[in-house]
Image (spheres, helix red, strand yellow):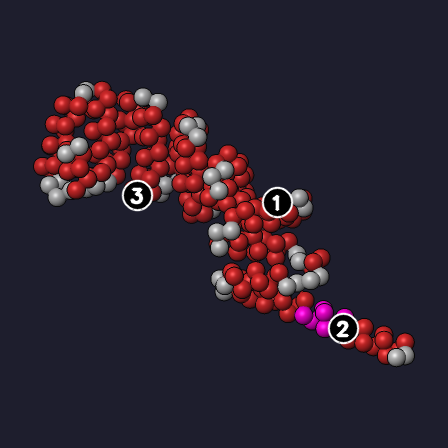
Amino acid sequence: MTKKKIVIILLIMLVIVLASNFLFLNLGNYYYANGQHHKSIAMYDKVFIKNTISSDILVQTGISQTKLKNYNKAISIFNELETDASGIEKYAKDVYYSKGICYYFTNDYNSCIVYLNKYREFENNKLLLKIICPYLLYSYFIQEMYNECIDTASYFLKDSDGDPAYENSILNFKYDCYFKQKQYDLAWEVNQQIIYNQPNDPSNYLGNYLIYVETKGIEYARNYLLELEKMFPDDDTLKKFLHK
């Protein structure tokens, strides 16, 4: 075989490689855009010219792994992206949010707090910030960081836009923090706001019952439950507490 033929064959092979690489990248992008995360990852994995994998694709791969609940794989990908200073600046919100969520679901609550708070520094959209609220509050609470949980809850309450269900999801954390610290007066104040927001939900009144058990005794608390039963005669939760 002549040298000329060898060069031609090598050029043809190079074109095939480049075309295949381009095809896999574009198929990966297509599947990602359509929420087909398994297929998206499969296509990106077939890319054999690795320096053609941009930061965009790394972010998409990490998000896909997060969607598929492959949290440790996602964290590894985001760590790779985070080492690129220019990349992390451009994709900070995606990386910080996704890493925070991944750490939450792997029970690394300290890291969850770190990354979701970093995300808060970049994100101004109130609706998107609402998404991280329960993850961040729970991470503080489960580690008994009660004061931090209360402060963060107060921050999110400022932008609740009068949504009673959302407000109560936050206020319940404040109540639990105060109750755990035996600050029953403050817990009581919070629970009155919870009741005010959703007066037709019997479970909201149980916060008062628990405070009465601690401050006024079980008999007083039980009488309170009996009064509640008159207000909500068909509520199974109240009946369970009454028959404990």
Depth-wise, is mark 2 or mark 3 nearer the camera? Answer: 2
Question: Which of the labelled discs sits on residue 13, or is there none?
Answer: 2
Residue 97's place in the image compared with 58, above or below, is above
Is residue 29 something one can see in this rendering?
no
Task: Determine if residue 18 is in view.
Answer: yes
Marks 1 and 2 sit apart, C-alpha to C-alpha, by 34 Å
Q: What element carries label 3?
A: helix
Q: Position of residue 149 (x, y in %)?
A: 41, 31
Please give the residue where the numbered disc 1 appears in the rendered image: 79
Helix, strand or loop under label 2: helix
Alpha-carbon span between mark 3 and mark 1: 36 Å
Q: Residues within 10 Å of mark 3 (few under 14, many from 20)?
A: few
What residue is drawn where x is 71% and y is 61%? Answer: 49
Residue type indicated by callout 2: Met
Q: Name the residue under label 3.
A: 165
Residue 18: x and y in percent read: 72, 69
Q: Is residue 166 above or below residue 11?
A: above
Asked if the magenta segment contains residue 15, the reply would be yes
Q: Are marks 3 and 1 in contact (CB under 8 Å)?
A: no
Badge 2 crowding class, 10 Å Cα cut-off, few under 14, some 14 to 19, many 20 or more, is few
Q: Quick one: SS at disc 1?
A: helix
Which segment did they paint magenta?
A: 13-20
For marks 3 and 1, the one nearer the N-term is: 1
Q: Which quadrant of the figure has residue 225?
A: top left
Work out whether 160 lies above or below 27.
above
Where residue 163 sits, quadrant-wise, is top left
Q: Are marks 2 and 3 in contact (CB under 8 Å)?
A: no
- Real-space Cα separation, disc 2 to disc 3, in angstroms: 61 Å
Residue name at image x 23 percent, y 28 percent: 210
Mark 3 vs mark 1, foreground winner is 1
Q: Position of residue 87 (x, y in %)?
A: 65, 48
Three-letter residue code for mark 1: Asn
